[in-house]
Image: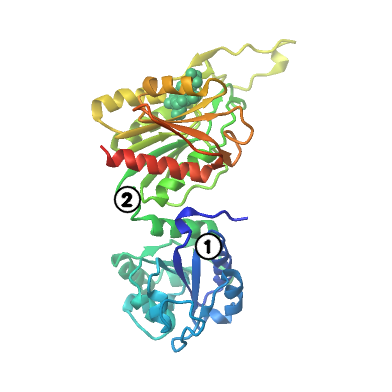
Amino acid sequence: MQENITLLTGKRILLGVTGSIACYKAVDLASKLTQAGAQVDVIMTRAAQQFVTPLTFQAVTGRAVYTDMWQTDAAGSLPTHIAHVGLAEGADLLAVIPATADTLARLAHGLANDLLAVTALAVRCPLLVAPAMDGTMYSHPAVQANLATLRSRGAWIVEPEEGRFASGLTGRGRLPETPTLMGAIRQALGAQGVLAGRRMVVTAGGTREPLDPVRYLTNRSSGKQGYAVAQAALDAGAAVTLITSARGLPAPVGAEIVDVETAAEMHDAVLEQVDRADALVMVAAIADFRPRTKAANKIKKSELDQNAPTIELERTADILAAVKDQRARTGYPLVAVGFAAESQELLSYARDKIARKGVDLLVANDISATDAGFDVDTNRVILLRADGTQETLPLTSKALVGEAIVERVAGLLDSR
Ligand code: CTP
């Protein structure tokens, strides 16, 4: 089941659905937004109703669906009974998904000839459009000019994807899938959040230290907590760079992704990125030791007689310690956050790490618990500040731990 999403909870989203075969995807989106806690009011054009019925959206949102400019809100679920004014009043976002070429033209030129168009003129919230049409139509100068007009007015445009159309042709113009659309909506809703105008670097995943071309040493980190911190920072309006050695997790929409493998690659990427960053959150589980040498070819047991190879290890560089030195010279990042994964004496080891690593905040978790830490979706952490204060968060989702960290980082940045 889709989890509640803090940013979406209680938000009023107007979902404008227009006449494209991609309408079926808007049904899933409306359902996921509702499950995440948003109040979704769907406005359908006449053409959209050729593909999906209003009842479908009504069933997944549990709310009335609006189709007619002359319709009044008899049910009284809107702030006023005049539909377009009631819909517009207090809306947090108008998302037109999918947006046809015709709708883009009408929005760009300010027409007011159906309920969606007139509502678009009445809203004061941001507008997001996700174009969906055949590739030749999408690349037509008229469509591109309309998109440029909307963009110049501050609209959020969700770039369509390349792929196969219902027509059988291929090209750019496909509506992205629900997770991408949800991510774009989160970006639009979070843009003015507590980290607006801030740049945050987040690291995630366990590094992989090669022994030979097929084998490596790694650890149990899944990357989930790091990705959750990155998503929470995006939800708070930050520009986010996610330096990751995790694989197989969906990239948070809007984050700049830097893929790395080893501790050495992560070291270089972090030192380069933090130069202009307001905050660094080091969630990654970086290898402390790596094989001293990497064999150029696969180590063959047939060549080892009956013996097993002896692997000699060497220390990797401590990235946070290097950041501490760089920060002393450059002043960046303004705020540094570390994690401490401990299996014993959590607090005393963690306190010691704050000073050694030069961080403003340390997130300590006890990895010996089965319901927290590696691989699971929940975590139980203690937040320790350099000033000696600490707070314990109860067992909760990694998403909420991410939000708590982002909130504390925003506080640290503001108090500087
Ligand atoms: N870290 C780092 N560079 C390393 C290892 C860890 O920057 N080579 C960071 C981690 O991303 C984390 C913090 O340091 O934010 C603490 O990591 P942890 O593994 O708990 O500590 P260690 O430095 O490995 O110390 P110890 O071996 O004493 O636990």
- Looking at the image, tell me whether mark 1 or mark 2 is earlier in sequence order: 1
Q: Nearer the viewer, residue 171 or 227?
A: 227
Percent x, y for residue 206? 53, 31
One can see residue 278 in this view: no
Q: Which residue is mark 2?
A: 196
Percent x, y for residue 113? 39, 86
Percent x, y for residue 137? 45, 72
Q: Is residue 218 left or right of residue 412?
A: right
Q: Residue at x 33, y 24 (%)?
A: 324
Q: Residue at x 38, y 72 (%)?
A: 143
Kindly indicate whether the residue at mark 2 contacts the one at mark 1 (C-beta within 8 angstroms). Answer: no
One can see residue 166 in this view: yes
Callout 2 secondary element: loop
Vertical side of 411 occupied by 294: above or below? above
At label 2, counting other C-alpha atoms closer than 10 Å, the crowd grade (few under 14, some 14-19, many 20 or more) is some
Vertical side of 73 occupied by 338: above or below? above
Tag 2: amino acid? Ala
Tag 1: amino acid? Leu
Q: Is residue 357 left or right of residue 164?
A: left
Mark 1 C-beta to ligand 1 under 8 Å: no
Name of the residue lying farthest toward the right: 306
Q: Nearer the viewer, residue 196 or 403?
A: 403
For the N terminus, give its image quadrant: bottom right
Vertical side of 48 occupied by 309: above or below? above
Vertical side of 335 occupied by 102: above or below? below
Q: Which residue is mark 1?
A: 33
Give residue 131's mark. Answer: none
Instruction: Look at the image and name its color scheme.
Output: rainbow
Callout 1 secondary element: helix
Q: Quadrant of residue 412?
A: top left
